[in-house]
Amino acid sequence: METGQQDVLTLLERLQQVADEIDRLTARRKEAEEARARAEEDLRETQQNLDAYRERAHALDIERRKRELAIKDGKERIQRIKSRMGDVKTSREYQAVLAEMSSAKQTVAQEEQALERDVEELEAVRVDMERVQTRVRDLEGALAEAEQRLKSVMEETEQAMAGHRAEEQRILGDLPQDVVDRYRLIRSRRGGLAVVEARDEACTACYMRIPPQMYIEIIRRTRVLQCPNCHRILVPPREPPQGE
């Protein structure tokens, strides 16, 4: 057995455990960050919707006032036309006044119908505004909770992260450089999982069979060996097979 290989394998096992814990804490932080980002985005989109409703309500209110003024002017015009009826001298003049009166009344009727539609839409928009305002308040609360959650997660994991990273650096410093380089390369290519157990003559990561002689060497911890299929570093199971 090559000198120090058992220690190297032990360090590699621990290194993977530490890396897994760092990944777990990193994922926990990322999850909290993403939750905050989603809450922020939901609030932003809902506030944009609220702004759009407000703009529509403002436009409808302006249009309502214009129509009310147009109706008032139209009715005043009708009164002025009526006041001229007594001054009509000829049938032609009378027909002209009637036509003008009919046109004025039609204009007022059209404006009143349009005003009714605008008022109905304005009321509907205001109902939607109230609903969205409630949603905004809810989302503001959700964002505040997400921000507090993120702060708590960062605080809770800070010390553990620092401890694990320090241990990771210590282990890397104790390992031969060629093993460190191999470990880092595998970890970068295999989703962070570089060291795995060999159990029942198979790799527990890719489940491919391992040649019997190679498996014996792994169990005996004679040297650093890699899975022939996925190329991860193989270590014996934490609970050795019966009879070993």
Image (cartoon, helix red, strand yellow):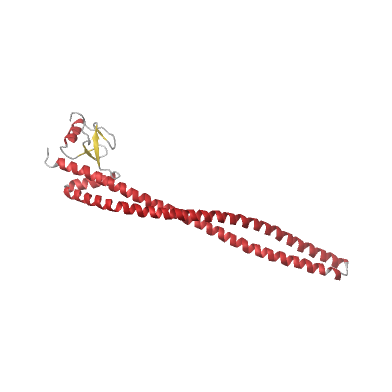
- Side of 238 where 107 appears, left or right: right
Q: Nearer the viewer, residue 86 or 25?
A: 25
| Displayed quadrant of residue 117 | bottom right
Q: In front: 80, or 89?
A: 80
Residue located at (30% from left, 47% from top): 23
For this orientation, the residue located farthest to the top is 243
Residue 67 x/y as whole percent: 68, 63
- The x and y percentages for residue 11 are 19, 44
Q: Quadrant of the N terminus?
A: top left
| Residue 15 drawn at (x, y percent) | 22, 45
Quadrant of the rendered image containing residue 229: top left
Q: Is residue 222 left or right of residue 98?
A: left
Determine the residue positioned at 30% across, 51% down: 157
Q: Residue at x 75, y 65 (%)?
A: 75
Residue 29: percent from left, percent from top: 34, 51
Q: Vertical placement of 118 versus 242: above or below?
A: below
Q: Residue at x 26, y 53 (%)?
A: 162
With respect to residue 20, does 147 lie above or below?
A: below
Q: Is residue 164 above or below residue 69?
A: above
Q: Is residue 235 left or right of residue 29?
A: left
Where the C terminus falls, by quadrant?
Answer: top left
